[in-house]
Amino acid sequence: MAISGIQAFLEILADFNVKYIFGNPGTSELPLNDALVGDDRFQYILGLQEIPVMAMADGFSMASRTLGVVSLHISCGLGNAMGMLYNAYREGTPLLVTAGQQDRRLQFEEPILGGDMVSVARPWTKWSVEVNRVEDLPVAVRRAAQTALTPPTGPVFMSLPMDVQMEISDALDLSPIRLPDVRVRPPLAALQQAAHVLRSANNPGILAGSRVTEADAMCELVDVAELLGAPVMTESGTTHGRLAFPADHPLNGQGLPLWSPEVRKRLEEFDVLLVVGMDLLRQYVYHEPSRAIPESIRLVHIDEDPWQLGKNYPVEVGVTGHTKVTLGELAQELTNSFSDEQSAAISARTARHVAAHEAARNALRSQIAAQQHLRPLTPLGLMGALSRILPDDVAVIEEAVTTTNTTFERLGVLKNTTGYFGHRGWGLGWGLGCTIGAKLAWPDRPVLGLLGEGAATYGIQGLWSAAHYNIPVTFVICNNACYQILKIGAKGIQLPNAMVERYEGLDLRNPEIDYVSLAKSFGVEAHRINDPDELSERVGESLRGNRLQLFDVPIARETPGRLNYG
């Protein structure tokens, strides 16, 4: 059958059950958009700028655990999208990112908009390629999908010249994408050694990251934690990602602090740490001591990617294997292998950790209660109001770290933790589009986006896509009219003017942005709310009613000291 290159591209994706293509088109992408006319196998999700386009695809892919497909407009569109591509790279999101390229017959003329996009995308992708023969296009699509979806997962990039997209051929191999089974078992000797080290620990702890949830390994992690009587601590708020452990489990040790001195203090009680599904460690700001993990701690590290093992900290045992399979087999190795004395010690330390965690939750509840009367709302006042009304199956996307501060997790109010998404790459503008993409993946789950007003402005055009396609998500803008994280950071490194509350370029005032009017201009119902009870009522109604709404909530504008938790 004679078909064009772009038709072959769509045939292979349709066979792979790709439903959505997220894009912002230009001339070099018109063959794709033209081919999509009347093709009901796909829904093209138009974004008005590349930041929300990429963020929507990112959220959809992370929530659905499928390939996200993105179409960008040549060099300028790729340039606009690079911050969100960096996020996806840091998250390991399996995205197939494409951009049209100028016709090959024009390339010697250095045509307008053309450029070396392959080199631009390469640092933040697993594979970056320009397809220069129509016969190679099907092979490239299959290779791209497999590369994106096999561990370590991540984005790939394909540059598609216009003439390759339009060229007709009857010699195209439309074989389907077939992925290998990546559930690789760990080496038995390494697994047994890991079990021995953990079994002999006096006070083990567990550090767990996003890849636990992405490998559907939370239940196996729960089994291991309960067998060891070990608290499970998740990644710091600056790289928090997905929740690896049930928020309401008694052994949830909450997130690590943000900075190395506090991380070190938090971990110093442990003699052995099991590390699974996380990068150890990706810190945000340099502090002394720079080594966040005390040298006395022995590390057992499990990951699907050997690159992560011993990368920054030497390990006692490194185990390469699929996260779900390896944790399951580790639990089997640990079951019934403890002496009576060890079992008694496990029971005692379990009780100690559970009591400490409940005391921390009670202290946080008391803090929230003490601040409910303050106006404007404090970050804890806002989060407390929302914590009262979260549906059990809610999905929460957070891009307001100085407000959210993992409060939902610390309170234990997230009942279905598969739906939690925290920032990992820190290219701003991600949260709004990610919220929309997650809702496309989970149409039957309520989805809440908690956004800082500064971060929201980077990707605010995504509101039009939510309205245009009637995607019913609830947004809450945590509005302190400044880049609060930067003020806190400036204080943290003791810059002289920051210490006396003087800042340049960090306030969003004179004029303040009217998010209610801005949202309405994109077709989204919006309200400004100052009272916590009204906030609880309105957001609860919006989530239960599956409505598209935005709530702008003024919060306290004083800059706190060193932000921390844990």
Image (spheres, rainbow, N blue to C red):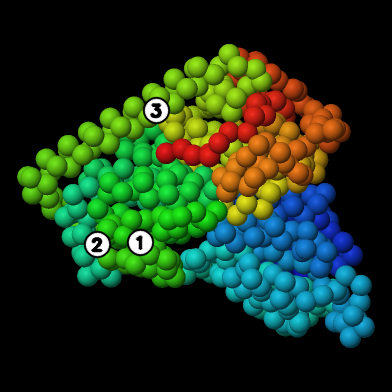
Pointer 1 or 3: first along the chain: 1
Q: Residue furthest bottom?
A: 108
Residue under label 1: 302
- CA gap between label 1 and label 3 equals 29 Å
Cβ atoms at labels 1 and 3 below 8 Å apart? no
Please tell me which residue lies in front, 266 or 458: 266
Pointer 1 or 2: first along the chain: 2
Cβ atoms at labels 1 and 2 below 8 Å apart? yes
| Number of the label disc, if any, that sits on residue 361 | 3
Q: Position of residue 47 (x, y in %)?
A: 79, 49
Q: Residue 168 vs residue 63: left or right?
A: right
Which of pointers 1 and 3 indicates the residue nearer the eye?
Answer: 3
Q: Amino acid at mark 2?
A: Ala
Residue under label 2: 194
Q: Is residue 203 visible?
A: yes
Q: Residue 112 vs residue 42: left or right?
A: right
Quadrant of res 154: bottom right
Q: Amino acid at mark 1?
A: Ile
Quadrant of res 522: top right
Q: Position of residue 545 (x, y in %)?
A: 64, 24
Please tell me which residue lies in front, 302 or 326: 302
The correct choice, above or below, for 280 with respect to 346 in the image is below
Circle 3 SS class: helix
Q: Amino acid at mark 3?
A: Arg
Circle 2 SS class: helix
